[in-house]
Image (cartoon, rainbow, N blue to C red):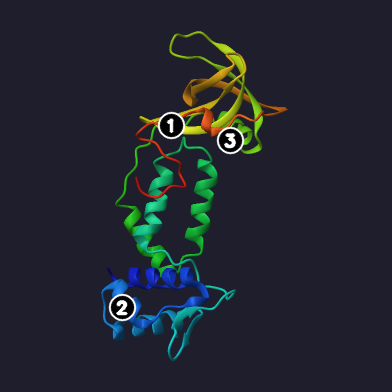
Amino acid sequence: MKRAERLHALSEMLRRNGTRGCSAERLAREFGVSVRTVKRDLAALGNSGAPVWSRPGPGGGYGLAVGASLPPVALSPAQAVALMAAVSAAPDAPYADLAAAGVQKILDVLDPRTRARADELAGRVWVNADPSSSRSIRSALEEAMAEQRVLRIRYTPRDGTTTTRDVEPVLFASTNGQWYLVGWCRLRNAIRWFTVSRIDRASVTGTACGDHTVLEVGEPPVNARPVHGRGA
C-alpha cells in the first residue's frame, strides 16, 4: 500500500473507532508496518490538519477529535477515479444525475495534488456507455419511487402492444445490462417488471401507493443485489 493510500486508510480507521482510539501497535499490525512508521504517519496526518489526538498510558492510543472539522475529503486518486468511472458507465441508473453531481462535489474539495493525479488517471479510463433514456421519463420514475406515488406509464413490450398503466413503484433493478422498474401493475393486479427503455411516457400522479413491499417481488436474480450491500 502506497503511503498516500495508507494515510487515508489510517484516518478512516481512527474515525471509525471514535473515542475509543487505537494503539500504535494495533495500527502497525493492521497496516503491516512498524510502530515507528505508524507514528510518522500519525504526525503527518496531524500536520495536514487532521484533528489527531493521543492519550498516553494503559488504555491510551490515537484517535480523531469528535466534532472537529476534517481536512478536505481524503480520497486516493484511484478512489476518486473509481467514483467517476462508476457514474460515467451507468448513465441510465436511477438518480444518475444526482450521483454525478455528488461526485463533482467530492472532486471539488479534494486537495489540489490528489485532484491533479485523479484527473491524470481518469484520462486512462475510457467509457463507451449506451445512450441514456429520456431524462423526463427517468425523472418521473425517480420521483414516483422516492415519494411513493402511483406512476402512469405508456409501455410497449416486445410484442408491440402499447398500453397505458398505473403502476405502484416498488424497486429499480438492473440485471443482464437492462434497467427495470418493478412495481404493482394496477391493470394486471400483479407485480410486473417493466424495461425502462420501453417506457415512452411517464408521469407522477397525486395518488399515494399502497402497502406493496419488496418482499412481494421475491428473491433478486442471482446476479443482482441491493446497492447498499458490500461485496458479492
Q: CA distance from mark 3 to mark 1?
A: 22 Å
The circle drawn on residue 28 is: 2
User: What residue is shown with label 1?
Assistant: 219
The quarter holding residue 135 reads top right
183 or 87, nearer to the observer = 183
* Relative vertical location of residue 18 with respect to residue 96 in this rendering, above or below: below
Dot 1: element: loop
Q: Residue at x 53, y 43 (%)?
A: 97
Q: Position of residue 66 (x, y in %)?
A: 57, 75
Q: Which residue is mark 3?
A: 142
Tell me the quarter of the picture where residue 177 sits: top left
Which comes before the other along the chain, label 2 or label 3? 2
Give residue 109's mark: none
Quarter the C terminus occupies: top left
Given residues 19 and 147, the one toward you in this image is 19
Q: Are marks 2 and 1 in contact (CB under 8 Å)?
A: no
Q: Amino acid at mark 1?
A: Glu
> In front: 112, or 106?
106
Does the rendering let one see residue 205?
A: yes
- Residue 106 position, x and y percent, is 50, 59
Residue 50, can we see it? no
Query: Residue flagged by tag 3: what amino acid is it?
Result: Glu
Q: Earlier in the sequence, mark 3 or mark 1?
A: 3
Local crowd at mark 3 within 10 Å, few (<14), some, or many (≥20)? some
| Nearest-to-viewer mark from 2 and 1 | 1
Secondary-structure class at tag 2: helix
Residue 55: percent from left, percent from top: 47, 88
